[in-house]
Image (spheres, grey):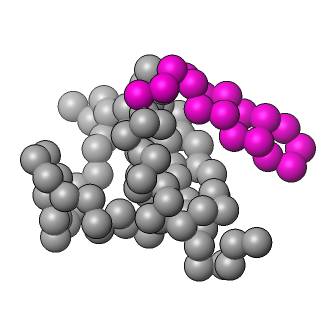
Amino acid sequence: MHSQDSSIQVNFLFRDGHSESFKLPISSQEFQQQLEGLLAKPWLIFHLRDQTVVISTSQIMKVEIKPPLSQLQGEGIFANSERVTALNRGAR
């Protein structure tokens, strides 16, 4: 069984502006190892206590993960970044 500190929260923001969050009973290290493969799949499936949720990865615009996956490194990954403003659609 996983301990309390071996879970992560994943928030998906979809093309239509909606978002949905899930708490997953895996460590951030386990999730990091799966992330690239997960986003390459056409569908993600989440089994909840009372239902199953199926998400089309082609509809995902942004993924937010807590705690951060600070071990990710390489081209296109920017360490020690700070969010200055949130994205606002239709603000203009």
Residue occupying the point 37% across, 40% down: 36
Q: Is residue 5 left or right of residue 46?
A: left
Position of residue 81 measured from the top left corner of the image (x, y, whole percent): 17, 65
Q: Is residue 14 left or right of residue 70?
A: right
Seen in the picture, residue 51 relative to 54 is either above or below; the reply is: below
Q: Is residue 5 left or right of residue 35?
A: right
Residue occupying the point 48% across, 26% down: 41
Seen in the picture, residue 73 relative to 71 is either above or below; the reply is: above
Q: Is residue 53 magenta?
A: yes
Quadrant in the picture for residue 80: bottom left
Residue occupying the point 16% across, 65% down: 79
Most extreme residue toward the left is 75
Most extreme residue toward the right is 50
Position of residue 29 measured from the top left corner of the image (x, y, whole percent): 44, 64
Highlighted range, magenta? 40-56
Q: Is residue 84 visible?
A: no
Q: Is residue 42 visible?
A: yes
Question: For this rendering, which residue is in front, 31 or 92?
Answer: 31
Question: For this rendering, which residue is in front, 65 or 20?
Answer: 65
Position of residue 61 measured from the top left corner of the image (x, y, whole percent): 38, 32
